[in-house]
Amino acid sequence: MAAMARAATTSDAFNAIAEPQRRDILALLRAGERPVTDLAQELGMSQPRASKHLRVLREVGLVRVREAGKQRLYGLDARGLQPVHEWVGGFERFWNESFDRLDTYVQDLKQTRQEE
Amino acid sequence: MAAMARAATTSDAFNAIAEPQRRDILALLRAGERPVTDLAQELGMSQPRASKHLRVLREVGLVRVREAGKQRLYGLDARGLQPVHEWVGGFERFWNESFDRLDTYVQDLKQTRQEE
DNA sequence: CCATCATATTCCTATATCGGAATACATCAA
DNA sequence: TTGATGTATTCCGATATAGGAATATGATGG
């Protein structure tokens, strides 16, 4: 019954960082805490839009909030990115090695085509 | 008019690897080329399902196919993962710092700036 | 209390997903 | 050709996304 769709953006760090603007936000936050309006302006997006992205990032734990008077300062919590880094890192030796393989593969293709 | 939705899974390596089963497929392919049925069985998914995931991976260039008689052998092309690794790696120093340390780090930054 | 600034949420719509089932397509073997 | 095997695609439905616009919530200073 439960006809599944794409996994929620909030289900994973993987899903959360699939959206380019959220990556931009995270990158900006490396420089320090910032309020929503700041981020929105810096990235050229509307305030509600920034708020929505930050909500996603908060729900996956990549960002945390701190009340500061009228403002809410968003800060980076990069710990959730470590598993992502590790998973992708597991392919490190392959993106160096696969050059030769791919080359031979392409050569084979060309040759096959010519022979036809 | 153009009411945007979530970006296509095929638009990015980021989007393509957001799906856990696709990550599983890529991980399996590190051991070498494999036909669809193999992958499907190993991962406990139906053949059409595996084929669909492989199509996405092919479209973003994380996987390539080679005809081998009746079979089509899928192989890893991990080069598309390198940018992902680099982006995430840009946060490495942040997940190593504990939170108190991060706070002090930010404080230090501010102070340093003021002193300049 | 009121006005103002800062931020979050709701309502809306077009789009795109993932999965199952059925089926089409392709290749080999006898 | 026919059958068998391996693979890709189509049709379908339920879900949930991103964005804009409008609005709600919240905190602060008079």
Image (spheres, coloured by chain):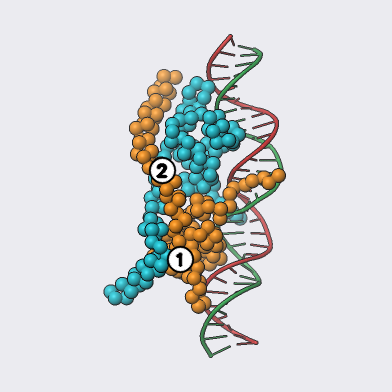
Chain colours: A orange, B cyan, C red, D green
**Chain of the residue on which disc 2 is drawn:** A
Disc 1 marks a residue whose amino acid type is Gly
Q: Which residue is mark 1?
A: A75
- Image point 55% across, 60% down: which residue? A59
Query: Label 2, label 1: how many angstroms apart (C-alpha)?
Result: 28 Å
- Image point 52% across, 36% down: which residue? B54
State the image quarter where residue B53 is shown.
Answer: top right
Secondary structure at badge 1 equals strand
Q: Tell me the quarter of the image containing the N terminus of chain B.
A: bottom right
Q: Could you say where residue D4 lies in the image, as x and y percent from the top left? A: 62, 18
Q: Nearer the viewer, residue B42 or A5?
A: B42
- Check chain identity for marks 2 and 1: say if they share one: yes
Q: Which residue is mark 2?
A: A90
Q: Nearer the viewer, residue D8 or B27?
A: B27
Give the vertical position of A83 relative to B35 (above or below): below
Secondary structure at badge 2 equals loop
Q: Could you say where residue B93 lies in the image, as x and y percent from the top left? A: 36, 58
Give the vertical position of A90 relative to A70 (above or below): above
Disc 2 marks a residue whose amino acid type is Gly
